[in-house]
Amino acid sequence: MRGFLRKHYLLIIILVIGVFFRLYNLGTSNLHTDEAEVYLASQNILKSGVPKGFHRVPFYENAYLFESNTSMYEFAPTNYYKSDLVLKKGWLPYYLTAFFSLFGKNEFLLRFPFALIGVISLFFFFQLTNILFNKRTALIALFFYAISPSLLFYERMVRYYSPMILFIILSIYFYVKAFKEDNWKNYLLGAFSLVLLFYTNVLIFLSLVIVLFIFWFTKRIKINRNLIYSDLIIIALILPWILFSGFLWNIAKEPRQITAPVFQSITAGINNNGSLYFFFYLGIILLLINIIFKKKIHNKTFLWKNNSSNYLILIYLLALIIIPYLLAPSSSFEEKLFLSLIPFSLIIIAKLFDSIFKVSENNIFKYVVIILIVIISIVHIETAIGRKGHNIITLKEIINIDRNELYNDIEEVIKEQTSGNPLILTTSEQFPLMFYTDYSAQTIWPVREEFINNYDEELVIIETGFVEGTCNLFYRYVNPAVRCNNNKNYLDRINECKAFAMDETTNLYFCKKRKKFIGGGLGLFFPDFPENQPPDFIWDLEPFQVAVNVKNLGESNVDKLKIIFIQDFGGREFDTEKSEFLFNKKIAGRKKVSGEVITSEEFFDLGNVTFNHKLPLKLRYINASVKLCYPYITMLRINICNDSLNICNYDVSGGPMQINSVSYDELNFNFSIYNSAEGFLGNFENCQEDNMTKEIKVESDFFKCEKLKDEFRCQADVLKIRKDDYYLISINYDYQQEFKKGLLLRSKERNKYDYENFYKKE
């Protein structure tokens, strides 16, 4: 045991450092947007076996409350900043998250499997570097790997990053060993590693397959049975998913325009900025010299003898830059796309330092080099991790990020300020909001401005984070000059909303439910008789059924309805089971639900009707005529100002009787009434009579109303009225409407042939 520790003490120390940094304070910080998104998508696995975003299961920002094709959204489909290729990057991280979420919903449990995978990567990264070059290079590379701020930042996330890096390392490690030793176990393990990489990130899998193929082709490795079997295993395990998900068909639809600064993204992904950039570029130069001018290098110090490893590294770096550049959609073209470059970048830097060790066999010089590596590493971990994206963050900050209680505070304020389950629109961080609170949230930028301005239910707008930067995420879909800066699509609406400043960067706007009617000048509506009730032509002495479908296009509920037969149907030539029908069936008024207007429709059966004698003519036209009588109410909402005890404005509900000639002063409200529909005022009880009492009642608990000539005058009770409130005045009346339909009446006797040979057979 002592001999093992003495022989591998450096390796053990570095591994302990790497494990410590990957697990320390793992559950302290909040899940950020991408991590919460993975969790939310993975929960669908527990319901249907498939994560959101896969196999026709939508994963849009708006999928939690609304269908993607509603008028709420500016574009359809509303998959705004996630392309199909990105969403289909792989299933494995989602299943991993779903499994660990069964044990609890907290940050440590969800991050632990990904951090553990990062720990496993440490050991196999050492093994890979060792077989490519030597143990000293492997130890130096492992040290840089263990303290890399970029790797620590990403490998601790609930995302595909740490599995992707592990399966890259495993695939190359086992296939390099297989190409050298021709061992079937290494081919098998390499094949399984590639399959797992495919189910983690399809794009990186494709890139690595091309790397291995080019390496196999250039090194002229023989095709053998083990290689063929490993390829068949890969095909057998990934082909069903490709066909099942329709992946190949969807790739063709992906946008190809790269708009992000390419070099900036690549260098940020390599993440050797600051102190390590110089050594990385110097290492690249030495790598190229060893490949191109190897025969001319006589100095053993900077001669990298393993030519196969040199070729593999160069092929890998080129392929993992070029292929994502050509295939990745612009929406994902950022530094995390190039995380796969980090392992081999660190190997190049480590090999450069290994060459420096060879400059002298003097032990003192070696210690100087070791001290230099430590100093450079300390400087490295204190510098920014990249030039774009998650920048200006150090290793110390990564492992010591405090828990942010902002989401808990937001939830408490929403509960205090709202009465139900409001629509929540947010500039960013919608997924953490849904993870940490009981509310669903939608991204606000794709929402139509007119929807926001006209949404009458409770609305919460959360402005958080770097608003302009978040807005510009949608540069491919919205014009930032129009939708951002001082033209944000929610600016008009928040003028009437109550504002709360949660912290320096987060503001909440609470927009109360608007007490606003839908409006309109109609009551009940009867567009036509139901099909064949009655039919388009009828026979004498042949009974037929009559019914009506009635819609309520106003906003008052109709609790009782009279329907009577009039004119031809009400004449002596027609026999009916009843001529007047009273229905105590509710026909609900129009309602607005989540911005959508809901109209009710009810069916009423009027029984059978018969033309009661032989028609002397061959045919004649008649009218199927009914009258509808019902009580109705048009409501007036009087809004009192919030700064004075005066009437500020008013609103009128939908109904056949509307108001005009409106005037108001302080707390006095005057108006006249007119008929806006095609019916007429009448008396419900005397529905069948032609001369009916036409009475309108104007009532209110807060206004005293009286009729003077053609005008109603209402005066508020000052003792009952308060500022910033609303009060109702009801206009009650009975209304009647007549509906007719032309029918063709035919004689059975004079149309005997048609009746017996066509009608009766049918």
Image (tube, rainbow, N blue to C red):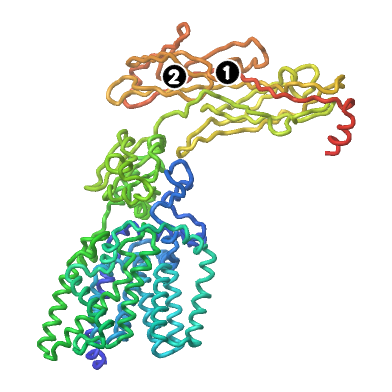
On the picture, is 94 further left or further right than 693? left
Q: Is mark 2 on a helix, strand or loop?
A: loop
Quadrant hosting residue 141: bottom left
Residue 578: x and y, percent? Answer: 75, 23
The CA distance from mark 2 to mark 1 is 18 Å
Three-letter amino acid code of the residue under disc 1: Asp
Quadrant hosting residue 553: top right
Look at mark 1 in the image and give the residue it sits on.
734
Q: Quadrant of the C terminus?
A: top right
Residue at left offset 63%, top offset 25%: 561
Q: What element carries label 1?
A: strand
Residue at left offset 19%, top offset 69%: 381
Look at mark 2 in the image and give the residue it sits on.
700
In this view, the residue in front, 160 or 618, is 618
Residue 112 in view (yes/no): no
Residue at left offset 35%, top offset 26%: 725
Residue 306 in view (yes/no): yes
